[in-house]
Image (cartoon, rainbow, N blue to C red):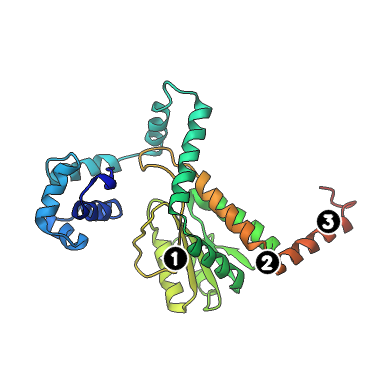
Amino acid sequence: MFDLNSLSPSHCRVGNWIVHNESAVLISTEKDIAKAAGVSIASVSRFWNAVGFKNLKEFKQFLKEKRDVTPAKKLLNTMTDLEYSNLQSHHLNRSIQHLQATLNFFQKETFEQAVSCIRNTNKLFIYAPGPSFGLGELLCYRLRRYGRDVRIIRWLGSEIMEELIHIDEHDSVLLFSFGRLLKEAEVLLKHASQKKCKTIVVSDQSVLEAPVKFDILLYADRGEKNEFHSMIAPLFLMENLIVEIGKSGTSLKNMEQLDLLRKRFKDYLPR
């Protein structure tokens, strides 16, 4: 949207708040924004010109047009960029950019907390809506190999309560939140907070606003809002999580047991 590195400290605070609260901007006044960003109203008024807009009204119009994006338009925006370039090489370069952006935000301590959380939990509940469903399935498949009790929450709407009744303080919840936090995800976080169980959120937002506090945020870049969203970085992050969890003695023991079963029944169920 705009380059925060080129802005003054006060304008950077305004810009950073706007980047992570686009929906709120549409219904905010300059006074609201100033209070939320912790700057003066005058700083907010000068901010628009610094980022190429006349005023807040013009910026709101820009946001409204930007938000009116369909999946078809996203793909069209991406294809437009390819007009004078090779498709495969362009996609590879974009993938590298997504991975690099993810690594730039990578925090080893936070990642290790997520690994420890999953290793030590009783049950791991995964909520993976929409395009993240494949990531949830992969995580479930691999972690169950390690002997982990992993359960994917497949219900939508009020039926999600069918899963909530099985979550207690010894469990953990891992949910994917790309673009925005869905209502089901909000309910999960609220319930997990009440039960005092650990929560891990995988998101394409480096700062995610939620109705209640969650424990761990893992960031994965998927590109700009108005282009085709890549899953290469989230997949990279999940595979690293799987590999790290697999290094424990218990996980290796379960893999050895799986290998013995394959040898025992290879004549019945050849691979």
Q: Please name which of the two marks, 1 or 2, marks the residue nearer to the observer.
A: 2
Q: In the rendered image, which quarter is residue 41 located in?
A: bottom left
> Which badge, 3 or 2, is on the more N-terminal residue?
2
**Gap in angstroms between the C-alphas marked 3 and 2:** 22 Å
Q: From the viewer's perspective, is 173 left or right of 148?
A: left
In the image, 149 versus 256, the foreground residue is 256
Q: Is residue 140 visible?
A: no
- Residue drawn 46% across the image and 36% down it: 94
Residue 262's mark? Answer: 3
Q: 10 Å neighbourhood of mark 3: few (<14), some, or many (≥20)?
A: some
Q: From the viewer's perspective, is 150 left or right of 99?
A: right
Q: Secondary structure at mark 1?
A: helix
Q: Are marks 1 and 3 in contact (CB under 8 Å)?
A: no
- Residue drawn 36% across the image and 43% down it: 225
Q: 10 Å neighbourhood of mark 1: few (<14), some, or many (≥20)?
A: few
Q: In the rendered image, which quarter is residue 253 located in?
A: bottom right
Figure check: 157 above or below 220: below
Give the residue furthest to the right: 267
Figure check: 223 above or below 33: above
- How many numbered discs, if any? 3
Disc 1 designates what residue? 158
Q: Is residue 106 visible?
A: yes
Q: Amino acid at mark 2?
A: Ser
Q: Please name which of the two marks, 3 or 2, marks the residue nearer to the observer.
A: 2
Give the residue furthest to the top: 84
Q: x, y (%) of residue 132? A: 51, 51
Q: Amino acid at mark 3?
A: Arg
**Gap in angstroms between the C-alphas marked 1 and 2:** 37 Å
- Residue drawn 38% across the image and 32% down it: 77
> Which badge, 1 or 3, is on the more N-terminal residue?
1
Q: x, y (%) of residue 149? A: 64, 68
